Image: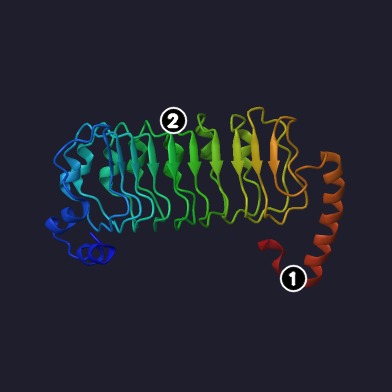
Amino acid sequence: MGNAMRGVVAFIPSERCQRFLVGDLKEMPLDRTLDLSSRQLRRLPVAACVFDELVKLYLSDNNLSSLPAELQGLKKLQLLALDFNCFEELPEAVCRLPQLSILYLGNNKLYSLPRELRELKELNTLWLETNCFTVFPQVVCELPNLKTLHLGYNQIESLPTELRRLEELRSIWLAGNQLAAFPPVLLEMHFLAVIDVDRNKIRYFPGLSHMQGLKLVIYDHNPCVNAPVVGEEVRRVGRWADCPDEVQEDDGSNAASETAAEVTEVHPEDQHSI
């Protein structure tokens, strides 16, 4: 079927037309994986929800904004990819998938998450990048097995102290947000291995050498006056990353004085917003 025909059929909401886009769904895939990505779907045909042994379901790059309640029948589903769609709210059925461990929700229009998300006790990987979050979704702090959290390219300004409850969290990706200061709660999470705060508004980095589990810190593209001091085995990505700490600290002090002078001279009224 050509892309032009798919485009026409995609606008017809009937179940029959939507099934035309996904083809024959009569047999359970041998690998228990169903990939319906890039089909221009506006509705997920209920026929896709009858495979109760399904383990992976890819629905990326469609035009979905809702999902049928029948989805919750996929009790063995472990991976669900809903990225690059049109979701403004997370469908309730997603929160009723008890074995779900990986959830991709990036590149949608989400601005909040339902409290029911906390029912996903097995969730260990959550991608929420490039959505519309202005506040950190608090319910994420109630996911006890979360290991990887991607929240890059939203509009988040701070992290809640409750985040420290996530003792299994090993990597947090926060690039492209509105963090004006390095989140204090991260300093208490000694078990973190990866911290990405690239492309924020952080001007000063505290020392991270006490974080014994840290392997990588990405802090590039911040208006910072220093680099974070880290342990010997930790890789830094950003300004002064290859310099000895004592060198960058000296440079940072000079840069801090110069930057402060510039701010005072040019934009004294903006000092609290930087």
Disc 2/disc 1 C-alpha distance (Å): 45 Å
Which image quadrant is residue 217 in?
A: top right
In the image, what residue occupies the spot 62% across and 55% down?
199
In the image, what residue occupies the spot 22% across and 31% down?
53
Tell me if mark 1 has few (under 14), some (14-19) or many (20+) residues whose alpha carbon lies within 10 angstroms of its own. Answer: few
Which element carries disc 1, helix, strand or loop?
Answer: loop
Q: How many marks?
A: 2
Which element carries disc 2, helix, strand or loop?
Answer: loop
Q: Do the residues under discs 2 and 1 have CB atoms within 8 angstroms?
A: no
213 vs 236, nearest the viewer = 236
Question: In the picture provided, is 20 more to the left or to the right than 121?
Answer: left
Q: Amino acid at mark 2?
A: Asn
Q: Position of residue 173 (x, y in %)?
A: 55, 44
In the image, what residue occupies the spot 35% across and 35% down?
120
Q: Amino acid at mark 1?
A: His
Which image quadrant is residue 93 in?
A: top left
Quadrant where the C terminus sits is: bottom right
Question: In the picture provided, is 181 more to the left or to the right than 52?
Answer: right
Tell me if mark 2 has few (under 14), some (14-19) or many (20+) residues whose alpha carbon lies within 10 angstroms of its own. Answer: some
- Residue 237's label in the rendered image is none
In the image, what residue occupies the spot 85% across and 50% down?
251
Outermost residue on the top side: it is 212
Q: Position of residue 152 (x, y in %)?
A: 52, 51
Residue beneath label 1, please? 267
Q: Earlier in the sequence, mark 2 or mark 1?
A: 2
Please name the colour scheme applied to the rendered image: rainbow
6 vs 211, nearest the viewer = 6
Q: Position of residue 48 (x, y in %)?
A: 19, 44
Residue beneath label 2, please? 145
Question: In the picture provided, is 52 more to the left or to the right than 209?
Answer: left
